[in-house]
Image: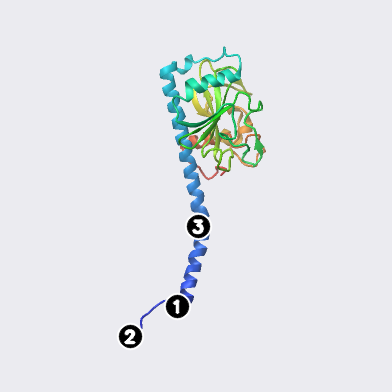
Amino acid sequence: MKKKKAFTLAEVLITLGIIGVVAAMTMPVIVGKYKKVQTINQLKKAYSEINQAVLLAQKDNGTLDSWDLSDFESSEDRLLYISENFLFPYIKVIKKCIPVSSECWAENTFTLDNKVFVPDSSGISGHGAFVTASGYSVLYWPHASGTGAWFWIDVNGPMKKPNMLGNDIFPFVMSWGNAPKVQISPDDCLRRLGFYPKGLDCKVLPERNDLIEGGETVDMPNYKCKKGSNAAYAGGYCAALLIYDGWQMKEDYPW
């Protein structure tokens, strides 16, 4: 009789152990790359959908240069007008929160340095939020001038962590009408009409390093896309950096 060759139990266990060690070493890298790609794709979708809403809103409300909310008496009135005329008719929204509540926006949000921050010093007065059918949520509020609004996008919604700037939260600015200059030293920032990530909202576009270090040419340095900077909104320019780099997270991206 011929003997059949087979692996011994010890050999099988050793092989499984080696496979386990290799998997333990490679899985975090694979998961990390997947999360990066997923974040970029989610941000792309949100950016595309809101830009599409702007284009559709212009068909019904006139071109951006003609929009004017300066006559409204309160931020709440401006918020309602923006919501009902510029946003909700053109975006698939599954939940609306006016004023903002934890159903649409996370109670605690963080900078890249894990510090809790509030997106605007005026608190929630005049702020709204909504959750879309695509899964992202938006916190938004109009400028006092009536010529624009802030839009903070949480690409995976309010219930999923980390709720952190540069990871799943990205600030944008929408400008219309006679958008005013914002004084910054040594230059002025003349707003670009339309919907842009914070850092690319000025007509004079920044250098890449300005987005990382918070250069003066792109408004307040508190928004730099960098860890360990102790900036009030560290991570705020990260959407701008992603777009600047062709929707890629390069090696120096603070993930």
Q: Secondary structure at mark 2?
A: loop
Q: Which residue is mark 2?
A: 2
Marks 3 and 2: CB-CB under 8 Å?
A: no
Q: Position of residue 59 (x, y in %)?
A: 40, 19
User: In the rendered image of this protein, does residue 104 appear above or below residue 175?
Assistant: below
Q: Image check: 2 left or right of 142?
A: left
- Taking depth in this image into account, of 196 and 207 the one nearest to the observer is 196
Is residue 173 in sight in this rendering?
yes
Q: Amino acid at mark 1?
A: Thr
Q: Which residue is mark 3?
A: 26
Q: Which residue is mark 1?
A: 8
Residue with the most extreme left position: 1
Q: Residue at x 43, y 19 (%)?
A: 58
How far apart marks 2 and 1 lie (CA) works out to: 18 Å
- Taking depth in this image into account, of 31 and 126 the one nearest to the observer is 126
Mark 3 vs mark 1: give the one in front. 1
Q: Residue at x 55, y 23 (%)?
A: 149
Q: Residues within 10 Å of mark 3 (few under 14, many from 20)?
A: few
Q: Secondary structure at mark 1?
A: loop
How far apart marks 3 and 2 lie (CA) works out to: 42 Å
Q: Quadrant of residue 6?
A: bottom left
User: In the rendered image of this protein, does residue 5 appear above or below residue 211?
Assistant: below
